[in-house]
Amino acid sequence: MNAILQYGNTIIPYTIKESTNRKTVNISVRDGEVAITVPAGIDETVYQPVLQQKALWITKQLLDHKEMQQESRKLEFRSGEKLPYLGRQYRLKVESDTVLKASLQFKQGKFHAAMPPSLTLEEQRSHLYSLYTA
């Protein structure tokens, strides 16, 4: 079920899931989407105060996600470029390899990308963007 939360002038859409296994209200913000899981049969008057109490936190999570998306769109995904990760910047090393599928890994304090040699530079960037934001 879909619903909205109003926090000041901000309207936040969210989905409600009922669960027979839950005893408390759970709020999650993933990929710019807000979802709450509530115990089955719970009345709206029980979970609405929890949402209002957590509205500032929800708004911050949504803004952080939006900023990260905007920042990642500015990236060119070239070897040597620094990518933000967990509040820090790490270098990207792009290598053309004999792999069949593009991959991106974080190891030893760097991002390592393996790209099939058949990909154009623009295709490489598109694949890296998808892998980085996943």
Image (spheres, rainbow, N blue to C red):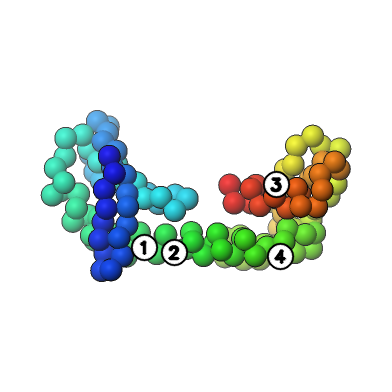
Residue 82 is labelled as 4
Q: Which residue is drawn at 25% across and 41% down?
A: 38
Looking at the picture, how far across and down is residue 46, in whole percent? 15, 48
Q: Can residue 23 be seen from the camera position used here?
A: yes
Dot 2 amino acid type? Leu
Disc 4 secondary structure class: strand
- The mark nearer the N terminus, 3 or 2, is 2
* Cβ atoms under marks 3 and 2 closer than 8 Å: no
Placement of 67 over or under 113, stated as above or below: below
The residue at 86%/43% (across/down) is 117
Label 4 Cα neighbours within 10 Å, binned few <14 / some 14-19 / many ≥20: some
Q: Which of marks 1 and 4 is in front?
A: 1
Q: Distance between the residues labelled 3 and 2?
A: 25 Å
Name the amino acid, label 1.
Thr
Closer to the eye: label 3 or 1: 3
Horizontal and vertical percent for residue 103?
72, 43
- Residue 59 badge: 1
Q: Is residue 62 above or below residue 23?
A: below
Bin the neighbour count of mark 2 within 10 Å (Cα to Cα): few under 14, some 14-19, many 20 and up: few
- The alpha-carbon separation of the residues under discs 1 and 4 comes to 28 Å
Label annotation for residue 127: 3
In three-dimensional space, the C-alpha distance between marks 2 and 4, rounded to whole angstroms, equals: 22 Å
Give the SS element for disc 1. helix
Q: Rounded to the nearest whole Å, what is the CA distance between mark 1 and mark 2?
A: 6 Å
Q: Earlier in the sequence, mark 3 or mark 1?
A: 1
Q: Name the residue under label 2.
A: 63
Q: What residue type is labelled 4?
A: Lys
